[in-house]
Amino acid sequence: EDARDVMKNGADDYLLKPTRPADIEHLLVRTAERLSGEREERQLQQQVAEHFDPGFIVYQSRRMAEMLNLAARSAQSAATILIRGESGTGKELVAQLIHETSGRSDRPFITVNVAALPETLVESELFGHRKGAFSGATEDRLGLIRSAHGGTLFLDEIGDLPAPSQAALLRVLASCDDDLRVGIGCSS
């Protein structure tokens, strides 16, 4: 009961009498590991805070801090970035955070939920079209990929895009080089 009361009042650990040297050594090792982990956690949070507005994404877990630290490092590259997570976990927020902290922040950030695009309009929406290309095409349309030129295009739920459109999209994106950063979100 005394040990339970001590723990409730803020103690990290306790020893029972009679105490053996091995018990003290074990307690010291556990305490050192805990303190080291706490120090690493503070350093990781500090690194994330250096790159991002701390209020942009609220988190507590170490894994989230590690992911944000990776996002901060990837913001400095022109690479295509795959962001995986269940629907509603904030993939778009992470993509926007990467865009805002990159050298492209003054350029467009365009989000496309490809699952919401009707299959018949996917290519027209992404690639654009010329007036008269099909019935209903009353004017030239630039397309979302071109609209994001120099900025970031976030394609959410890319796995829901029909296979032929995925192949066409891959060909177009491969030709974009560094003119466009692409963030791809998919449910895992």
Image (spheres, rainbow, N blue to C red):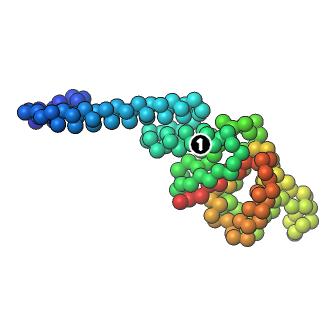
In percent of width and height, residue 93 lies at: 60, 44
Residue at the front extreme, as displayed: 21
Displayed quadrant of residue 34: top left
Displayed quadrant of residue 150: top right
Q: Is residue 34 left or right of residue 186?
A: left
Displayed quadrant of residue 56: top right
- Placement of 121 over or under 103, stated as above or below: below
In percent of width and height, residue 135 lies at: 87, 69
- Placement of 123 over or under 31, stated as above or below: below
Q: Amino acid at mark 1?
A: Ala
Count of marks placed on residues? 1
Q: Residue at x 67, y 65 (%)?
A: 161
Residue at the right extreme, as displayed: 132
Read off the residue under disc 1. 71
Q: Nearer the viewer, residue 28 or 180?
A: 28
Q: Residue at x 49, y 39 (%)?
A: 65
In percent of width and height, residue 52 lies at: 59, 33
Q: Residue at x 49, y 33 (%)?
A: 45
**Quarter that holds the N terminus:** top left
Q: Residue at x 86, y 56 (%)?
A: 141
Disc 1 is placed on an element classified as helix
Q: Nearer the viewer, residue 154 or 70?
A: 70
Q: Does residue 111 appear in the picture of this structure?
A: no
Residue at the left extreme, as displayed: 18
Q: Does residue 42 appear in the picture of this structure?
A: yes
Q: Nearer the viewer, residue 188 or 28?
A: 28
In percent of width and height, residue 187 lies at: 56, 59
